[in-house]
Amino acid sequence: MTATSTARPVEAGAADRVAVRSYKAPIAYGIFTLIALVLFVVLGRDGTSTFGLSTNADLVQLAPVSLPTRITGIVVTVLLAVIAVFAFTLARAARRIPLWLTVVFGVLFLVAFLTWASANQTIPVPGLLIGTVSLSAPLIFGALGGVLSERVGVVNVAIEGQLLAGAFVSAMVASITNQPLIGVLAAMVAGMLVSFVLAAFAIKYLVDQVIVGVVLNVLVTGLTSFLYAQVLVPNSQALNSPPRFPRIPIPLLSDIPILGPVLFRQTIIIYVMYVAVALVYFGLFHTRWGLRLRAVGEHPTAADTVGIKVAATRFWNVSLAGAIAGIGGAFFTLGSVGSFNKEMTAGAGFIALAAVIFGRWDPLRATLAALLFGFASNLQNVLGVIGSPVPSEFMLMLPYVVTIFAVAGLVGQVRGPAAAGKPYVKG
Amino acid sequence: MKLELRGITKRFGALVANDHIDLVVEPGEIHCLLGENGAGKSTLMNVLYGLYHAEEGEILLDDVVQHFAGPGDAMAAGIGMVHQHFMLIPVFTVAENVMLGHEETRFGGRLDLAGARAKVREISARFGFDVDPDALVDDLPVGVQQRVEIIKALSRDAKVLVFDEPTAVLTPQETDELMAIMRQLKAGGTSIVFITHKLREVREVADRITVIRHGKVVGEAQPTATNAELASLMVGRAVELTVQKSPAQPGDRALVVENLSVLDANGHRVVDSVSLDVRAGEILAIAGVQGNGQTELTEAILGLQPHVTGTITLDGRSLRGASVRDVLDSGVGFVPEDRNEDGLVGAFTIAENLMLDRSEGAPFVRGGTLQLGAVQRFAEEKSAEFDVRSQGVGTPVGRLSGGNQQKVVLARELSRELRLFVAAQPTRGIDVGSIEFVHKRIVATRDEGIPVIVVSTELDEVVALADRIAVMYRGGIVGIVPGSTSRDVLGLMMAGEAPTDHAATAAEGVAR
């Protein structure tokens, strides 16, 4: 057997795989190249576009970069066409389209789009990126919660509810105690309580996990909206004006051009987020906890036969996932907005769920996916401010369009944890 | 280590799966638990392993009473188990699977993968296994996966090792290797409990044999006992071990399959350029280890596979690309390999299941309404004909035994005007009495002049039924040989080795 498989010119393990030509990616490239042709060349605008690279507080001031709008559009469109043709030849030869090609294509398209949209205007690049981080933070916390929960075998549709509960409770507790950190702790407890309900119904009573998740979202939305109207609004001074976290610049690191202010001039929640992403990644793939967690999510019976307690593992890790998502909720009230508003999460939990799938249940990839979604949202904000030629209603759609494309088109068929969504019944 | 079970009783509701079972396994002996499917062997072992809790009785290891709250306790006490359905996590590596549940960690809680790899290598070397600790379990053939299970048990210093139906997924050659491993373990002082329903294996390797029937120990036997003695102990009456059939009277080529290939959803070629033909009045058995494309081949014939190339013709009419309805209407009867999944609707009654494929019109449906009287009469008639034992045709099939469920499927498929009969794993998981019945019906179908395809992973069944045998390996047909081919040759073919020209041409001769 080894002799025959090594003789074939394909990688081991895929010896019997038949090369299937997939034109999905090249066609997508082609469509975007056409859009580029229409927007940037046919409807091209004259003038110069300026990209501001530094904020006033920066130690090292970088000069803004100016690009001639029309010429940049034409050059990029040509480059896009070249990539699209290259992708077609790859597909014809039944080769895989490498991921970096998609990334290069996306970045080029983005540069051209920004140049086109900001003719005779200035786009503040650090501002664009700082906003991205702050819009992504709740998505990242939510996605981490989703990854943990699904990896242990419980589908977590309730991220939205966990975020919202965290946001509400942290606003109230931080207002009463005047301590934002206690607010964050309270948010973790709130997220965990939502998880308890999910875990109890999914693990103990074997109810369909998606249905419990949806019901929980509705429940938390209703509950927080009711309490907001009845309790927070009449006493907003005492109960809904929490102190916000101050920004803490990290010495030296925060002076790095462009990245410094984006990554290292942030509130403590963002720093906690960096640590959380690293910890979840390390824990999941390099520790006993992670190995057992993944075993339970893939093949609970096998985990049971080596002495791992499946129900307990699921229960506590789903609870932990809720606590992490709760921090994301606290970021809404204590990190960005500054007070609780009705339904203020506005679907962030579902976008976090999309990030989990787009990130293939991997904490690092899910984080990158959440950043992409955050960037799309913030792009809409920034272009709205500088007055882009695209209608704002259209721009409002952007993050969701990106989400749909990302989840449906780019990911293709990926396999999640095998036992996610399936209750484990012993015997 | 000496293992003793005293008076183990395990009930599931009203069903007594184990009824006061006593069993003693001496150190360094291979003790066979022999019994039919559903006799309670696996339940007993799950009690021993801590997965179930017995209502009565106790477990003793070296004369000390044990209390197992779960598998963790059983393992700590020195009991290891090689499960019938492997308890391995497919997306983990061998080393990760072996360490799972008793992981060693290093500084900062990091998993000690290097230690686990070393352990896998050490045990592999001791038994002459060739197992790569970094291979993903999913990529390994089943024979190797089973070795990983053995390594897993041994890495916890198991002194009593339970093998639950270990040979079901192995080729005959792999089975021989497993027997050698068991003897080697025994020589090292490990006590072995070997659960099986295959008589040949028992006689080959056992030191002592305990026979279980309907949850009770019905007797002990010596390995020198004959097959007939063991079988009658197991079943409770004398059993006909061979299928009575006259030589086939093959007619014209009825089903012709040429260059048939099937791609699965991931683009894997699961059936690879298969060509075969079946003549009227003969049984073509398709042998092979589970998962070598047999399932997809039969499903392609029935029209259940979406990506099929090549030709399938039945009596000159093309079946490829036809809908399942058309295929059924052209006279194809099909017994799927998993009756609970694909053959029956468990919550439906016997009567409803018997008419499932006939909801198109008369006599069971008129003007869109069910003709309950006709359904009832038909069901009663067929139940009697096929000896379906139940409390009436209104019983949900989910409550029937495996053997009776299979008879319902058979009754439905055989009561149409057939031009081809395809039976996939027709006797999997059913009792010996039902096996005899199913085999008789299959031979009777052949004798009516209908071409028959039987897919089976059990070599005994293949040899008993086949007029010709096609062996599948990795989606392709290794060769088509006469029904009289020896087991050794078939075993080699199941591992992918082409038969000698002599055997192949002999089969051609039979076909002509």
Image (cartoon, coloured by chain):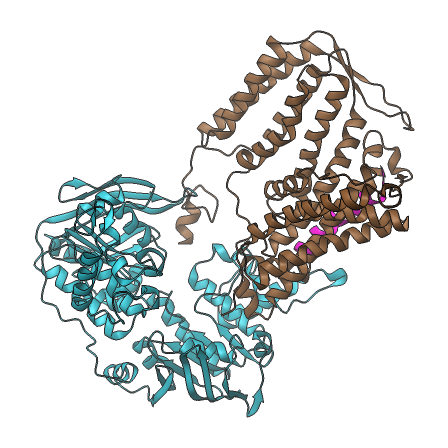
| Residue A194 x %, y % | 68, 54
Q: Which of B370 and A27 is in front in this view?
A: B370
Q: In which quarter of the image is residue B489?
A: bottom left
Magenta residues?
A265-286
The quarter holding residue B495 reads bottom left
Q: Tell me the shade of chain A.
A: brown
> Chain B is shown in which shade?
cyan
What secondary structure is the stretch in magenta mostly built from? helix
What residue is shown at x 81% (from left), y 44% (from top)? Answer: A232
Which image quarter: residue B368?
top left
For residue A159, side relative to residue A267 (left or right): left
x and y, in percent, of residue B189 in the image = 51, 84
Residue A423 visible to the viewer: yes
Q: In this view, does A123 lie to the left or right of B478?
A: right
Does any portion of residue B289 appear in the rendered image?
no
**Would you place residue B454 above or below residue B35 in this image?**
above
Percent of width and height locating residue A279? 74, 52
